[in-house]
Image (cartoon, grey):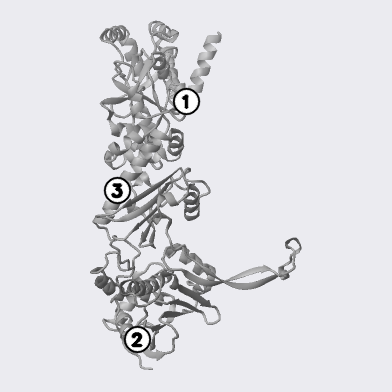
Amino acid sequence: MAVKQFKTESKRILDLMIHSIYTHREIFLRELISNASDAIDKLYYRSLSEGETGLSRDDFAIEIQTNKENRTITISDNGCGMTKDELENNLGVIARSGSLNFKKEMNEKNDEIDIIGQFGVGFYSAFMVSKCVTVQSRAYGSKEANEWKSRGPSGYSIEPCEKETHGTTITLELLDNTEEENYDEFLSPYRISALVKKYSDYIRYPIRMEMEKTRLKEGVEPKDAKSEDYETYFETETLNSMVPIWKKKKSEVTKEEYDRFYQDKFMDYSEPLRVIYSSTEGTATYNALLFIPSKAPFDYYTREYEKGLMLYANGVMIMEKCADLLPDYFSFVKGLVDSEDLSLNISREMLQHDRQLKLIASRLEKKIKSELLSMLENEREKYEEFFTAFGLQLKYGVYSDYGMHKDLLSDLLLFHSSEGKYVTLKEYVGRMKEGQSGIFYACGDSLARIEQLPQTETLKEKGYEILYLTDDVDEFALKMLGKFEEKEFRNISSDDLGLKTEEEKDEQKKQEEESRELFDFMTEALGGKVKKVVLSDRLGSHPVCLSAQGGISLEMEKVMNAMPNVPQESRIRAEKVLEINPSHPIFEAIRKLYETDREKLKQYAELLYAQALLIEGFPIEDPVAFSGKLCDLMAQLAE
């Protein structure tokens, strides 16, 4: 048997095929099945165009067999087959694609030709798992068959052989197992079946395999059965679905079928909240089938979570998670895209970033936004369920990338409200009181904590609605938005809510001037812990509260400083203001102490500041000192 050398720098290129181009060894099966499908396509299109074969679509199939004793895998098709010259040209010259040449020729006659192979290298992925590859092929209409055989870069041989029917049979003799690699896994029919399901489930022709099964022997009752009462038998199964659910008309697919497909494909026990179907033709032709899950995966808000849509090229799975098709703020979306137009790299495992990819991603983004808005407007209860699971991701989307996506996402946001329910920003603005200049919000660890803030009491009594922010990112997102429908966002813990009339401002200023020396003394007594001490008109029955002036709010200080590994010297500080209620008895008490016992007033100032910290959810700087001051005061009152 004469061994021929590969053309075009065979050893170097073939070594590249085996060791560098493909990431996963299991890809070999996808490539060989795709080649078999292409071979059938060529003969099928020939029968359509020339009408001479007498074959119909139902006559075609791909067969897979495993032989554990010989450690071989065989993939057979009854497609067009190859002549000796075609074996020489297609398999002896690496990176020459017979499918690509056929596609170019036929596309001049038929725009619908759908051939998978383009590069002519997929066949050589077989050497990732094989020490010897044998190809027996007989061209349709020919009486002669030939065998191509190779053990890798050393070369190949072509000899006549016997083959009863047209088509191609490829036999892989698997590599020996090593400590790192177990090639025997590919001898398991169930492993082969799983790979077909994963990569080639939508090849248009049946992929068949003989599967070992067990059944009860005749006459044995199931309730009385023992292990020896079962017998083994073999049954040929079709491993692939053939017709993708996303290529069927929506009217032909039931909700139950969509739900079952989602649950099986994405391993979710729950039904999806929404199914999104999109099909476009033109600059970028693709079909997309997307799902909005009803619950967040357990690892969704962790670094381990991988976003992405499954990517198919003409029904063949190319990537399990294509991250470039989804923006981070829509990373919760599950689903797939099937396109004929994507530019793939030579291994067909990765995309080359091109205009079609960006166009598809942009269209999907708009489609997802449209479907979410539709759910918000027409299925409010369902949308709130979605937002509870994934709303945090939308808020991060508003804040990230310097607010680049805030206009896209702002009308999808929901916030808890003092009205006791979720509200959109549009709904809030639509029912603002006449003359209200800003959107009021309050921050806290929980809704209950926010309800107890002194600042909320007066605002609610005056009939103002307040947004309740409980997620760390909430205030950062609102700061990034800046305004909504020209209404500014205002933290109720900021120093000025813009609610006072000019007369009220003048009256408060007059009162503060009368107590200026008192407040200056308290500010100094607190040793720089607060920027100033002022009177407050928003405390209702509460004695004190903290507010902040400047760009850093109290909540921002808490969130930023709670991040891990923030050194003490790098911690940010809000410019705190201690506000005192002039209508509360405590105000009269500190006024008297300023005249009679300023040392005790210092203690009062510390206690009032600590109380305000606790109300806002800050830790007390020195709990021991606070406890001591409190006990001293209690002892004095008991005298």
Q: Secondary structure at mark 2?
A: loop
**Mark 3 or 2, closer to the camera:** 3
- Give the residue at mark 1: 449
Q: Quadrant of residue 495?
A: top left
The residue pinned by badge 2 equals 155
Q: Which residue position is annotated with label 3?
A: 363
Q: Amino acid at mark 2?
A: Gly
SS under mark 3 = helix
Q: CA distance from mark 3 to mark 2?
A: 48 Å
Which amino acid, by three-letter code, is at mark 3? Answer: Arg
Image location (x, y in percent) of residue 44? 36, 72
Asked if residue 334 can be seen in this view, the reply is no
x, y (%) of residue 601? 41, 12
Q: Residues within 10 Å of mark 3 (few under 14, many from 20)?
A: some
Q: Amino acid at mark 1?
A: Arg
Residue 34 in the image: above or below residue 154: above
**Which of the two discs, 3 and 2, labels the residue nearer the N terminus?**
2
Q: Earlier in the sequence, mark 2 or mark 1?
A: 2
- Badge 1 element: helix
Please give the name of the residue rendered at 44% of the width and 46% of the height, measured from the top-left corner.
300
**Earlier sequence position, callout 3 versus callout 1:** 3
